[in-house]
Amino acid sequence: MLTKLMPQDEALCREEFIRDEVSYNLIHLIAGSPQRIGLKSPDGRMIYAQSPRGNAWLWISRDVAMDRRQLLLRELVSELGEAALPGVTGEPGVAEQFSSCYAEERHGAYRHQMTMESYHAPAVKSPLGVEGRIRRAAKEDTQQVARFLVGFSEDAYGVRANAASQVETAQRLIQQGGLYVWMAGGHTVSMANIAHRSPRHGRINAVYTPKEERKKGYASALVADLGSILLQEGLVPMLYADQANPDSNRLYQHIGFTRCGTISDLKFVHNG
């Protein structure tokens, strides 16, 4: 029988999970949310975590045999009852196997949304000769950040938005204190965000430079500086990159980030 996953659960400290922890870093964030659904196998070798409206994240130890994995996934689908999941994220084989079980049980379907590479940087290499400097985003940056979020949404997810719809998100990111911008020639030319700190890692996201300012090293310099901030705190910087975007993958590798695993994002198509 599956049991509840609690914040700082011992399952999150098992050696088996820690060796995959970069790829599954969001499980730490979700596990700490009071509204989350969290389940684990009694031996801690399967962890399921879902925020109220987001994808479920599913980890199964790579040491679990295929037939045992199938049994665990069927038990998980049964335990979830009538919950209508938006999707699941996990190692490609695990995500596919769970999606097949879930879709079969619900008489639905699923589709591939995105494949991501997870990266970490035990050391960062700042690019040389990049004009400008880093600055923490402030209230006066709200409108510019909102415009950057429009571009980020379209580039990362193919979703078109307008700046007015992103003002609230911009305000929230600025207030949280993790959003930084790169200044060059008196202009804000790039942004990146320290989104979350888990016990061993700091996750960077929302990396964006408008098209007219790209190929100048701004994002590389900014992410490298954020990585240095996290390393000084005793945390290893990590991030996810869309496998379909070779430019961003090369950017991160150039400043010292190395691959730690591939993650698939699958979405469910619910009938009715």
Image (spheres, rainbow, N blue to C red):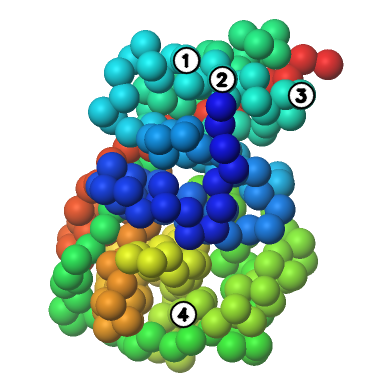
Regarding residue 59, the answer to whether it shows in the image is no
Q: Is residue 90 left or right of residue 256?
A: right
Q: Give how far apart the Cα atoms at labels 3 and 1 are.
A: 19 Å
**Residue nearest the viewer, comparing 122 with 166:** 122
In percent of width and height, residue 222 lies at 35, 75
The kind of secondary structure element at disc 3 is loop
According to the image, label 4 marks what residue?
181
Q: Give how far apart the Cα atoms at labels 3 and 4 are.
A: 43 Å
Q: Give how far apart the Cα atoms at labels 2 and 1 are.
A: 6 Å
Q: Give how far apart the Cα atoms at labels 2 and 3 are.
A: 14 Å
According to the image, label 1 marks what residue?
71
Foreground: disc 3 or disc 4: 3
In percent of width and height, residue 154 lies at 57, 49
Quarter of the image for residue 87 reads top right
Disc number placed over residue 190 in the picture, else none: none
According to the image, label 2 marks what residue?
75
Amino acid identity at mark 3: Glu
The kind of secondary structure element at disc 4 is strand
Q: Is residue 261 left or right of residue 144?
A: left
**Residue nearest the viewer, comparing 151 with 69:** 69
The residue lying at 70 percent from left, 45 percent from top is: 53
Are there few (<14), some (14-19), or many (20+) residues within 10 Å of tag 1? few
In percent of width and height, residue 271 lies at 77, 15
The kind of secondary structure element at disc 2 is helix
- First reached walking from the N terminus: tag 4 or tag 1: 1
According to the image, label 3 marks what residue?
82
